[in-house]
Image (cartoon, grey):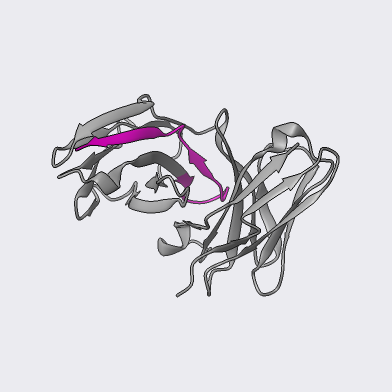
Amino acid sequence: AQTVTQSQPEMSVQEAETVTLSCTYDTSESDYYLFWYKQPPSRQMILVIRQEAYKQQNATENRFSVNFQKAAKSFSLKISDSQLGDAAMYFCAYRSYSGTYKYIFGTGTRLKVLA
Amino acid sequence: KAGVTQTPRYLIKTRGQQVTLSCSPISGHRSVSWYQQTPGQGLQFLFEYFSETQRNKGNFPGRFSGRQFSNSRSEMNVSTLELGDSALYLCASSIGGGTESGNTIYFGEGSWLTVV
């Protein structure tokens, strides 16, 4: 069975600085999708970035980028120029390319942004 | 385009009662999935529906059930409520199918259920 691990329960970053959130996963599959979702205090889960495992190029969305290391089964999220609005819980998620249609989420990392 | 809509947003029920939560997906989305979020267990997958058929189910007791209608709207029902069912229930929708875009889910704001 697949698992997703986020080993950092909480992280802090100074406004305008860069922070990296870690995520590792375990799977025997070769094709899959990885995601980062953000959950602010409103509890609305918002998609931050998505990575297809077959793509070697790391995904980027404005200030958000990932470091996808398939062999190491690592999928970290880098937030550049951190803003106060980035403060939230961040969840890493895994989805099989085929077969089951469920997402497997990590336990989340709470990000605090310090002014 | 309207997002995923969940109703009710907040509700309080008594142990032993049953509850029904509703989810309207994004227009054009045919897949609806449900998740339970608690502080202790994180986000746990309940089930997923596509074109009125349940495609996958998580490890929850039979008290948790769901269905999907022809217009893709979905409901989940929890019978004989227990204190441990208190949680945020999140619904998510996606286009469905095997396309890249079809594999991304978009969440609603959730339904807060408190069992007393």
Q: Position of residue B32 (x, y in %)?
A: 60, 60
Q: Position of residue B76 (x, y in %)?
A: 72, 54
**Residue B115 seen anywhere in this rendered image of the structure:** yes
- Apparent side of residue A61 relative to residue B51 in the rendered image (left or right): left
Which region is colored magenta?
A95-115
The residue at the point 68 percent across, 38 percent down is B86
Q: Is residue B37 above or below residue B101?
A: above
Instruction: Locate the N terminus of chain B and report the quarter of the image it occupies.
Output: bottom left
The residue nearer to you, when weighing B103 against B13, is B13
The residue at the point 45 percent across, 39 percent down is A29
- Apparent side of residue B115 relative to residue A40 in the rendered image (left or right): right
The residue nearer to you, when weighing A44 against B104, is A44
The residue at the point 43 percent across, 45 percent down is A41
A10 drawn magenta: no
Q: Position of residue B61 (x, y in %)?
A: 77, 37
Q: Is residue A96 above or below residue B59?
A: below
Q: Is residue A74 above or below residue A37?
A: above
All told, the count of numbered labels is 0
Q: Is residue B86 above or below residue B51?
A: above
The residue nearer to you, when weighing B67 against B4, is B4
- Apparent side of residue A111 relative to residue B52 in the rendered image (left or right): left
Q: Position of residue A35 (x, y in %)?
A: 38, 47
Instruction: Locate the C terminus of chain B and report the quarter of the image it occupies.
Output: top right
A104 drawn magenta: yes
**Residue A75 seen anywhere in this rendered image of the structure:** no
